[in-house]
Image (tube, coloured by chain):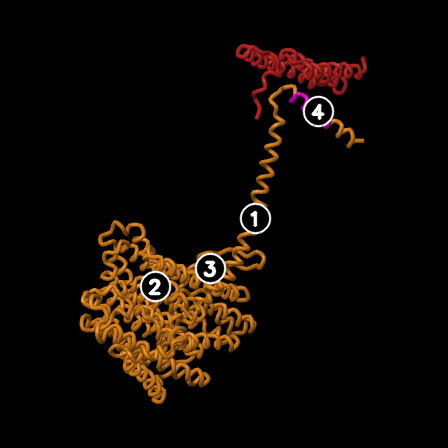
Amino acid sequence: MGMDQAWLIPAIPAAAFAVLLIFGPYLPRKGDWLAIAAIGASFVLVFPILADLLDQADGTTYVAGEKAWEWISFDLAAAGETFNIEIGFYVDPITIVMLAVVTLVALMVQVYSIAYMKGDPRYGWYFTVMSLFAASMLLLVLSNNLLLLYAGWEAVGFCSFLLIGFWWEKRSAAEAAKKAFITTRIGDIGLLIGIIMLWLEGPNTFNIQEIIAFAEEGGYGDTYLTGAVLFMFMGALGKSGQFPLHVWLPDAMEGPTPVSALIHAATMVVAGVYLVARMLPLFEVADPIALDVVLVVGLTTVMISATMGLAATDIKRVIAYSTLNSLGLMFVALGSSAVAAAMLYLFVHGFFKALLFLSAGSVIHATEEQDMRRLGGLAAKMPITAAMFAIGTLAMIGIIPLSGFWAKDEVLIFAEEEQHIIVYLVLLSSLAITGLYMTRLFLRTFLFAPREQETYDHAHESGLLMTVPLLILGLLATVGGFVVFDEVGEALGFPGGFAQFVFLHRAHEFDFQFDTAITSSVLAGGGAIVGWILWQNKAELAASIRDRFAPVATLLSNRYYVDEIYQFAIDRIVLVLGSIIAWFDRVVVNDGGVNGAANIGYFAGFEAKFLQSGRLPNYALAIVGGILVLSIAMLVTQV
Amino acid sequence: MIPIDNFLVLSAILFSLGMYGVLARRNAVLILMSVELMLQAVVINFVAFAVYLNPETFTGIIFGIFVIVIAAAEVGLALAIILRLFRNRQISNVDEADLLKW
């Protein structure tokens, strides 16, 4: 077993999907064990591949494993070239990080789902789609060429659509699924254009490494390459819910909570981060404006999502905003060319955000309520869930020594070194806001007096199938950040800390800066403490502040009216344009062209049928007349 | 040798007579007879041209025999139809049988 067998990782869940799709209803327990066994096998397979990668590495120089099969090949006669599409798999440290997060979180989520989805009428279908999702996500991560990556990219989007709309009988869920699909499609078009642009001027291949090598030799024009990477970034923008395409992610919370944990927190939404991290050499070769766009988009998302998180009342939506917040941070890191920081954040974020979602799911499962205005005091009833939620909250806020702290700190160090001071200050202020809204979420859900006695009485701690995944993720969210230390990395068999495993140009030692760490801790902790003061007991203080700044509160709870702006644009521009085109299609193309041609034939036939009188003399006369006409015509033309 | 014009004029006269009969007569049997006249005009043309243009071969003459055979078969068929028409509807005039139309 080694890197050459990496194709097995997506193939196993894909096979499970195929079996479940056909035989699922006839299997015992609707085949949930098969889906879990498949993803478990994929998870186990990551380790031999990682070991092989480390074996072949020389110090911190990693030899990427690549294996490809020809899929489609035909001659381009005009260009005198052969057009090849390969099914190829590529393993390098970035891939390994993604594989570890995806397989581990997927395994935890699927085990959790056994209890969470129990009794659902579409229980089997849920696990079928989960297997398809795992297969597509792993394909996306392992693909060595852009076309295969795009196929996985679209497949995860499709699974996301199916799972957001899993309870499609509920109108809001169906609408949210449609919104998510269409919004991400807008970005995907950009990704496709970017891929085509890279191929068109490039070395007649879709292979990512060959394209990067070609670009680094200056094969593409500067402006052209900048355009191409910005189009590709559009795809990342849509998938990772970055401003201005962030609107779908909060609505995606209509899906089952484990789906939110897996797809809309830990894996699919970070596909955009993965794509940019993978293609970062291109961004660097291109005009600096490309990286600036990544940075500004990330920074905008960080700020708007953090502030919107302050006003949301649905616990899942607050976590969704915190996801946007985290994704924004990753893009800020990428905008500073800090692949190690972005991937570290992605790694630990997968654990603590899945943990947050799954503990929120535990609350929703127990109380059937997800509005924090009707919750409260649940810590007494659900101690494990509350403790795990607290770990997730502290990791998200970035309290030392939880995993979120180390990852966030790496991002901050790069932002401080590489970027303008304003970027750094905005990031710091976002940390304080994160502290505020995450504390609010925790307090309103788990502490102080319950606001609805009936819901509170109904609550109970979830079973082992739900709490064990929570505990495992809680442990990882606590200790996951320690991989930044060289000693921890060496103890695990790596050459050093995280940044010596995942890096772009050169490995770097773990670099802890006390001033940054102290500043960020003070701000994040301060935010949390202020949050505690504001929202303790009956939250009178917070209510009075909200009343004093009523316009701001309205703006935030209406999510900056971005949805309304889109709705306006859709109603006034898209639908109006659409109705004009529809009119043209209906009246000119259909009535005039298609029906018109048919009507000509119909009327001509209708009029001409009366020539057929049924009387033999008429026909005889017609024959004679015809011959006479033909003869005269012949005579005339021959003269 | 009789000039070919004579044959052609005879054939044209016969054809025109036949055509007049087809157009002017109402009785189906008479129309059939007129059609026979037209066919014979064609046969005369075939034989005349065969003798004048290509006397070594019999192509045109054989063709004439074919036409006669086919005409006989056609008359047999047509008379059968006319007989059935008369049996079923007691008519023999073609303009009265006008149901086969749109």
Marks 4/1: CA–CA distance:
43 Å
The residue that label 2 is drawn on is A5
Marks 2/1: CA–CA distance:
58 Å
**What range is drawn magenta here?**
A618-629
Q: Quadrant of residue A119?
A: bottom left
The residue that label 4 is drawn on is A625
State which quarter of the image contains the C terminus of chain B: top right
Answer with mark 4 or mark 2, whichever residue precedes in sequence.
2
Tell me the mark number nearer the camera, choosing from 4 and 1: 1
Q: Which three-letter amino acid code belongs to the residue tagged 4?
A: Gly
Q: Which three-letter amino acid code belongs to the residue tagged 2?
A: Gln
Q: Considering depth in this image, is A507 or A569 the residue closer to the camera? A: A569
Residue A41 appears in the picture as rendered: yes
Marks 4/2: CA–CA distance:
84 Å
Marks 3/4: CA–CA distance:
67 Å
Label 1 is found on which chain of the structure? A
Tell me the mark number nearer the camera, choosing from 3 and 1: 1
Tell me the mark number nearer the camera, choosing from 4 and 2: 4
